[in-house]
Image (cartoon, rainbow, N blue to C red):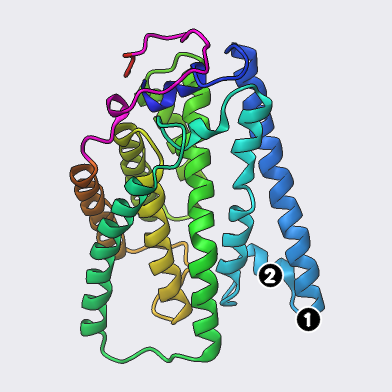
Amino acid sequence: MAYHRLGLVARFRPAAWWRALIELVLLAAFAALFGIACVVVLGVSAQQHGRDFSVLLEGSVDPLTPLVQVLVIASILPAPFLAARIAGRNPRALCSTALRLRWGVLGRALAVVGALYAAQVLIDVLRAPTDPTVTPFRLELIAAFALAVPLQAAAEEFVFRGALPQILGQWGSPAWLAYALPAALFVAGHAYNWVGLVDIAVFAVCTAVLTWRTGGLEAGIALHAIGNTVFFSYGALGLVDPNATEIGAVQMLGATFMTVACTALLLWALRGTGPGSREISSGGQKPLVPADATA
């Protein structure tokens, strides 16, 4: 069973077009609710520490701005699971065709992506004209990103490569459309110039291909989490501006190369983990699409 079709069979109640619509509405509502709640909590905390939270949230030169944005996105992680469960389907299907997070697949993906980014960091260190200034505050900021960014990356993958394709799959969308429409929304959610949006579009396509070919979100989460952690850590050290919206061609080409290289190696390292490698149980419910449907 193709990943984007799981919403048709991994269910507690029979699939119906209106249940998919309810799931979509609930997904948007829960995401907004959790995001607003996080903003309120962070706003109160910022006020108690004498900071102008509106400046932090809108984007500024403040080094805490990227962390605030990461935390707000991370807060929506429960939304796709709650929406799926209330709409009558198994929320574990959001993880993979095995109806669970495949830790072995995630571990291999982290090893592959981690090795490539470690090589990039080493090259950057050797090429750097001067050492970055390391302060206790910057180290604390890096530690905060290391904890928060994986949750932020997982939240975006579960929404844009998980919930939305599976909702569209319940309406009979072919794979290319089920992944393309959420990818367009993902790109539209980034406020970069056209050069930066090209990089985001390539990333969206690559993570969609990884999800489709491996039958789960593990590879995309690994790529997203490590790439963003390195980027925001560079920002914490003052090596890049994480708040910049005008992206240069050299930066875009470097980021795109890493994304494509990681994707190619992941597809090789994770071959054999696709939809056909593990049958799922439909909990006794008769499948609503052929078991061999892959389109």
The amino acid on which the numbered mark 1 sits, given as a three-letter code, is Gly
Nearer the camera: disc 1 or disc 2: 1
User: Does residue 119 lie above or below 187 as drawn?
Assistant: below
User: Dots 1 and 2: beta carbons under 8 Å?
Assistant: no
Look at the image and give the residue range highlighted in magenta.
271-291
Image coordinates of residue 51 in percent, x first then y, are 74, 78
Image coordinates of residue 69 in percent, x first then y, are 60, 61
Nearest the eye: 43 or 52: 43
Image coordinates of residue 91 in percent, x first then y, are 57, 32
Q: Classify residue 63 as left or right of residue 254.
A: right
Image coordinates of residue 8 in percent, x first then y, are 50, 16
Residue 29 shows in this picture: yes
Q: Residue at 24% across / 64% down in the picture? A: 115
User: Which circle's residue, 1 or 2, is located before the other in the chain?
Assistant: 1
Most common secondary structure along the magenta stretch: loop
Residue 203 shows in this picture: no
- Label 1, on which residue? 50
- Label 2, on which residue? 55
Q: Quadrant of the C terminus?
A: top left
Is residue 244 inside the magenta stretch? no
Q: Residue at 59% across / 54% down in the picture? A: 74
